[in-house]
């Protein structure tokens, strides 16, 4: 790790992770209360990857997310009230309350969308990178995807195209060891998985995805490389989802000892301890931040619940051309 902390940067990283954790807890409550239709997939535990990655980006840089994408949206700057609204099907949501958790689209922050298709983020980010290169904008695209995508054909096609055309895209694999209910070793051959990038002569490496500074440092270098026209990078971050595949999954396929080992490496607590050690914040400072963030998130959820659902006048919107 070579990332150097100053107080404003460290506070931003910490606050973003805490916001995501608090947001996901409210989403869990909404789903349990029957307010969120369909499935929701929580990002709790993986916050360091999304926050550390998005902290390296400019506002007009692109991200393409996956089904577990609320954290990416928040880290890239989306408004949490509108995110809540979308997840519970309210009209002011980012997709007018029609898309829900897996179809959140926020072009103002460069967010190409969360995605219900396994591997769907990979060609989207690759295409955005191609567009940026052709237009000469200097923008970079990030593709977030899980370890389940390591076996998808579209990954190899996109890696080939990105390498061939030297596209400004960074492929970020969030390896939480499980594709839905299946452990990665049961379905994925070819360790180390970084070989997938190396096969196309793309710089590839694996990192600790539970440390936001490690993530920030690794992605910063990849983004800088992409901006200089040197092409794509393939990064794997080992992380862990605290929740089931989706809310309601009891995780009976997981070992309790395994869970305890990962939770002992919690990215928020790790950052908090480091900030105190480096005298960037006191324990009381952090406690106050936590309380303020939790209050803000709970208030946003309450506002979203009072927002209107799509009405009859919305029925034909985006169905027919004007």
Image: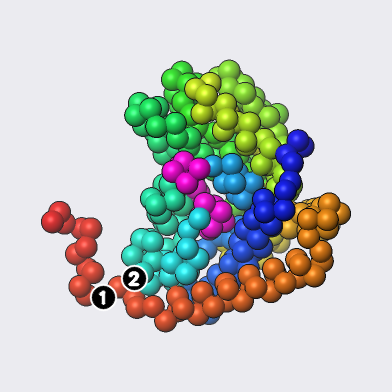
Can residue 240 be seen by looking at this rendering?
A: no
Residue in view at x 38 percent, y 72 percent: 90
Dot 2 or dot 1: first in sequence order is 2
Q: Residues within 10 Å of mark 1 (few under 14, many from 20)?
A: few
Q: Kindly check if marks 2 and 1 are in contact, taking CB atoms under 8 A apart as contact.
A: yes
**Secondary structure category for the residue under label 2:** loop
Magenta range: 58-76
Q: Position of 178 compared to 4: left or right?
A: left
Q: Position of 211 compared to 304: left or right?
A: right
Viewer-side residue, 311 vs 38? 311
Q: Is residue 125 magenta?
A: no
State how many labels appear. Answer: 2
Which image quadrant is residue 281 in? Answer: bottom right
Q: Position of 5 compared to 82: left or right?
A: right
Residue in view at x 83 percent, y 52 percent: 278
Point out residue 295 in the picture as x, y percentages from the top left corner. Answer: 61, 76
Give the CA separation, mark 2 to mark 1.
8 Å
Residue 311, disc? 1
Residue with the mark numbered 2: 91
Can residue 60 be seen by looking at this rendering?
A: yes
**Secondary structure category for the residue under label 1:** loop
Residue in view at x 36 percent, y 69 percent: 92
Classify 165 as above or below 151: above
Classify 102 as above or below 6: below
Residue in view at x 57 percent, y 76 percent: 298
Residue farthest toward the right in the current orientation of the protein: 277
């Amino acid at each position: 790790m070579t990332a150097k902390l100053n107080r404003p940067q460290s506070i931003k990283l910490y606050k973003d992770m805490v916001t995501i954790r608090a947001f996901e807890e409210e989403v869990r409550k909404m789903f349990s209360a029957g307010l969120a239709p369909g499935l929701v997939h929580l990002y709790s535990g993986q916050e360091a990857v999304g926050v550390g990655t998005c902290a390296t980006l400019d506002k007009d840089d692109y991200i393409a997310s996956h089904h577990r994408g609320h954290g990416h949206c928040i880290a890239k700057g989306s408004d949490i009230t509108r995110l809540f609204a979308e997840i519970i099907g309210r009209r002011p949501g980012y997709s007018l309350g029609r898309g829900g958790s897996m179809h959140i689209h926020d072009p103002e922050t460069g967010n190409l969308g969360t995605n219900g298709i396994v591997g769907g983020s990979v060609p989207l980010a690759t295409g955005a990178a191609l567009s940026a290169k052709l237009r000469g904008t200097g923008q970079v695209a990030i593709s977030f995807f899980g370890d389940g995508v390591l076996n998808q054909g579209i990954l190899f096609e996109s890696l080939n195209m990105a390498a061939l055309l030297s596209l400004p895209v960074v492929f970020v694999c969030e390896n939480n060891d499980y594709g839905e209910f299946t452990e990665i070793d049961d379905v994925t051959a070819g360790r180390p998985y970084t070989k997938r990038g190396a096969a196309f002569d793309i710089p590839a490496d694996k990192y600790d995805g539970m440390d936001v500074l490690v993530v920030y440092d690794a992605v910063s270098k990849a983004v800088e490389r992409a901006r200089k026209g040197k092409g794509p990078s393939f990064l794997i971050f080992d992380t862990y989802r605290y929740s089931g595949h989706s809310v309601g999954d009891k995780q009976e396929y997981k070992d309790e000892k395994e869970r305890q080992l990962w939770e002992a490496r919690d990215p928020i607590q790790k950052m908090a301890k480091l900030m105190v050690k480096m005298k960037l914040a006191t324990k009381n400072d952090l406690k106050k931040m936590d309380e303020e963030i939790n209050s803000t998130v709970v208030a946003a959820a309450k506002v979203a619940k009072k927002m209107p659902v799509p009405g009859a006048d919305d029925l034909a919107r985006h169905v027919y051309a004007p």
